[in-house]
Image (cartoon, rainbow, N blue to C red):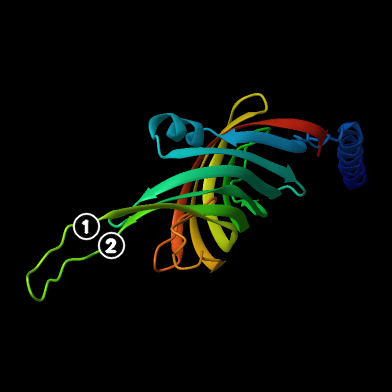
Amino acid sequence: MYKYFISICLLFVFAENFSQEQKKDSIIPQEKDTVIYKTNYGLRLGMDISRPIFSSLYSNYNGLEIVADYRIKKNVYIAAEIGFEEKTSIEDYSNSTSKGNYIRLGLNYNAYDNWLDMNNEIFVGYRYGFSLFNQTLNNYTTNVSDMENGSYFPAVINTIGQTSTSLNAHWSEFMIGVKAETLHNLFIGFSFSYKVLMSVKDPEGFKTLFSPGFNRIFESNTGFGINYTISYLIPFSKK
């Protein structure tokens, strides 16, 4: 009786093990999700739309800036801005006009983690800036008041139109900004920059008040800039 009982138990154990092996063999391995979202690499060209607007609003300003960047890594871009500016600076005792060209070269790093196939940016960047320009002293007024004795002599406006050529300025520029893809490969951007003047060549007997690309030069040799850009990406590849 015991022999039959043990034999039946062994039979059930064998059958259970056999069924488990069959289930393992019948399991179909699931493939991993292999969908990879690639983004465009290429040359992005555009312009700063604020400068034509300022040119139409203010009679003492005229400017144009072309912007470009090229993606070299997932989050790294080589960037450049090339432009022209003419600005008449009206001070208390002088009126002068600066006119010339400039270029800014550097890198942008995109700190924004895009979702799926999005291609937006929140970036920080650095630029080295260089400008070559002329400055014309249109007129000046001599300060002839004598505050100690309380006397005042009528000021005379001296119109001379003296132009100093081959002036230049060098500066460093730190930027933060955003670029959003509003349509396919079309981007709208905004950036804010803090500028530190490294050197500037002043005209003889006068001071450089405005450098194209740098903006107004203060006594602290620092300045600020704002850009509003629209640009289009010319894709060369996808990675």
Which secondary structure, mark 1?
A: loop
233 shown above or below 7: above
Distance Cα–Cα, label 1 vs label 2: 6 Å
Q: What residue is pinned by disc 2? A: 142
Relative depth, front residue between 189 and 102: 102
Identity of the amino acid at label 1?
Ala
Residue at position x 69%, y 43% in the image = 69
Residue 29 rendering spot, x and y as whole percentages: 86, 35
**Quarter that holds the C terminus:** top right
Residue farthest to the left, as pictured: 150
Mark 1 burial class by Cα count in 10 Å: few <14, some 14-19, many 20+: few
Q: Nearer the viewer, residue 10 or 25?
A: 25
Instruction: Report if residue 75 is visible in the image.
Output: no
Tell which circle, 1 or 2, labels the residue nearer the N-terminal end. 2
Figure quadrant of residue 121: top right
Quadrant (top left, top right, bottom left, bottom right) of the N terminus = top right
- Location of residue 198 in the rendering, given as x and y in whole percent from the top left corner: 56, 69
Q: Is residue 131 left or right of residue 153?
A: right
Instruction: Assess whether mark 2 and mark 1 are in contact (beta carbons under 8 angstroms).
Output: yes
* Image location (x, y in percent) of residue 178: 53, 42
Q: Residue at x 58, y 53 (%)?
A: 133
Residues packed near mark 2 inside 10 Å, few (<14), some (14 to 19) or many (20 plus): few
Compared to residue 35, the image places residue 178 above or below, namely: below
**Residue topped by disc 1:** 155
Report the residue that reaches farthest toward the top.
Answer: 183
Q: Helix, strand or loop at disc 2?
A: loop
Which disc, if any, is residue 20? Answer: none
Could you say which quadrant of the image residue 9 lies in?
top right
